[in-house]
Amino acid sequence: HGRRLSHSAAAPARPSFGIAFDIDGVILRGRNPIGGSPQAIRRLYSDDGTPKIPFLFLTNGGGVPEYKRALELSEILGVDISPAQVVHGHSPYRELVKRFEDDLIVAVGKGEPAAVMVEYGFRKVLSIDDYSSYFTDIDPLAPFKKWKVGQSNCKTLMSEKVHPAYDVYAERVKGVFVVSDPVDWGRDLQVLCDILSTGGLPGNGKGGQPPLYFAADDLEYQAAFPSERLGMGAFRIALESIFNQVSDLPLKYTSYGKPNPFVFKKAANILEKLAMDIYPNSQPTTDVKDHQFSTIYMIGDNPKVDIYGVSKAGPPWSSVLTRTGVFRGKDNDPNFPADLVVDTVEDAINCILEKEC
Ligand code: G3P
Ligand code: MG
């Protein structure tokens, strides 16, 4: 990343603004770039490839470690994205490592949820696939599932034959982390109800509900299909409704990701550091505060998540709503109006650069 961090000899004063991009429905649909996103991102670099404008991706998606997502985005967009420029819904989990020191935790969701948690520093992590595989008959519908098991399941079955990594029959699950969108909703709802209603010992345990975290709470999001898909928020509603029927006490949980102001604060701090990397000689400061930009633009497609999040975060955040994802309206969103509404992310960048440069 030497080239990325160097600044050109004729570097002007550092820009007084930064940009946070939503991914699904703004930059990509599925794995395909949309709204002129590669061109839009390239405008944030000088002709020689050095970055000009501090920017990052602030997405409620995830399921892989940030360094992997950075590589994937670099490949799709044709620029050099660093892991620091990726903030996933689950990125705040990193700050909970101390709390779960030597505790067994379960990680849920598509991709590599356990690898994400291990990368953050958690030491005793099982994916819900691995965890479930230790309990015979925990999912009575398993024999009826016709799909081929993925790679991680194959590994699980193989390692299981040797011996379980942890004594899951005696050791309580002390925390559950929904990292990305759950894959096998039926099995996951069953096993999470088991863990959460037994103090973390499915089958015969008793005890209070272990802490439960969701990386995001999006009811719907824009994927490759023409209309929105059910997201982690929909899964949370399903789990909560069922748990509250089968248990005496209501489900307790914490959701990170947008619109939680916490992630906007985190993103602002990262943008500040990126600005110092790109322009090391201007405004040297050791004390990073999130008010050093006059404006930080959030370009998003989901009024309830991206635009509401900006309004909760307050200045210097400013919202730009595109029509390439969840929002398709002609005018502004009536409930969560954005500061600016445009068709695509390319239009957003044109407007921002015209105003700021
Ligand atoms: O599963 C991803 C979805 O919840 C939202 O992603 O990039 O639109 O915040 P994004
Ligand atoms: Mg989105």
Image (cartoon, rainbow, N blue to C red):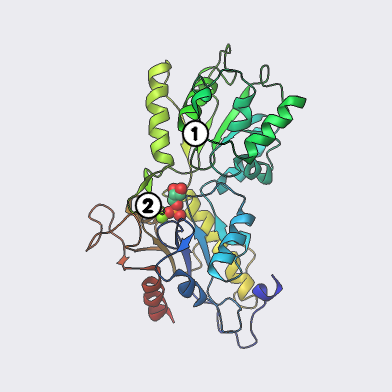
Identify the residue at the far top of this view: 204
Q: Is residue 68 left or right of residue 232?
A: right
Q: Amino acid at mark 1?
A: Asp
Q: Nearer the viewer, residue 78 or 329?
A: 78
Residue with the mark numbered 1: 184
Residue 347 vertical placement versus 32 (above, below): below
Q: Is residue 94 left or right of residue 250?
A: right
- Residue 127 - label: none
Residue 132 vertical placement versus 89 (above, below): above
Residue 111 vertical placement versus 12 (above, below): above
* Cβ atoms under marks 2 and 1 closer than 8 Å: no
Q: Work out which quarter of the rendered image holds the C terminus and state it.
A: bottom left
Name which residue lies at 31% across and 61% down.
338
Q: Nearer the viewer, residue 141 or 103?
A: 141
Q: Quadrant of residue 198?
A: top right
Q: Position of residue 45 (x, y in %)?
A: 55, 78
How far is the residue under mark 2 from the one under mark 1? 19 Å
Q: Determine whether the residue tagged by mark 2 lies in a helix, strand or loop.
A: loop
Name which residue lies at 63% across and 31% down.
130
Q: Position of residue 219 (x, y in %)?
A: 37, 43
Identify the residue at the far right of this view: 162
For label 1, the crowd category at 10 Å Cα-Cα, with few meaning under 14, some 14 to 19 and many 20 or more, is few
Q: Nearer the viewer, residue 25 or 120?
A: 25
Residue 66 appears in the rendering: yes
Q: Position of residue 354 (x, y in %)?
A: 39, 81
Residue 260 appears in the rendering: no
For label 2, the crowd category at 10 Å Cα-Cα, with few meaning under 14, some 14 to 19 and many 20 or more, is few
Q: Amino acid at mark 2?
A: Phe
- Residue 225 - label: 2
Q: Work out which quarter of the rendered image holds the N terminus and state it.
A: bottom right
Q: Position of residue 101 (x, y in %)?
A: 69, 34
Q: In the rendered structure, which disc, 2 or 1, sits on the residue that comes first in sequence?
A: 1
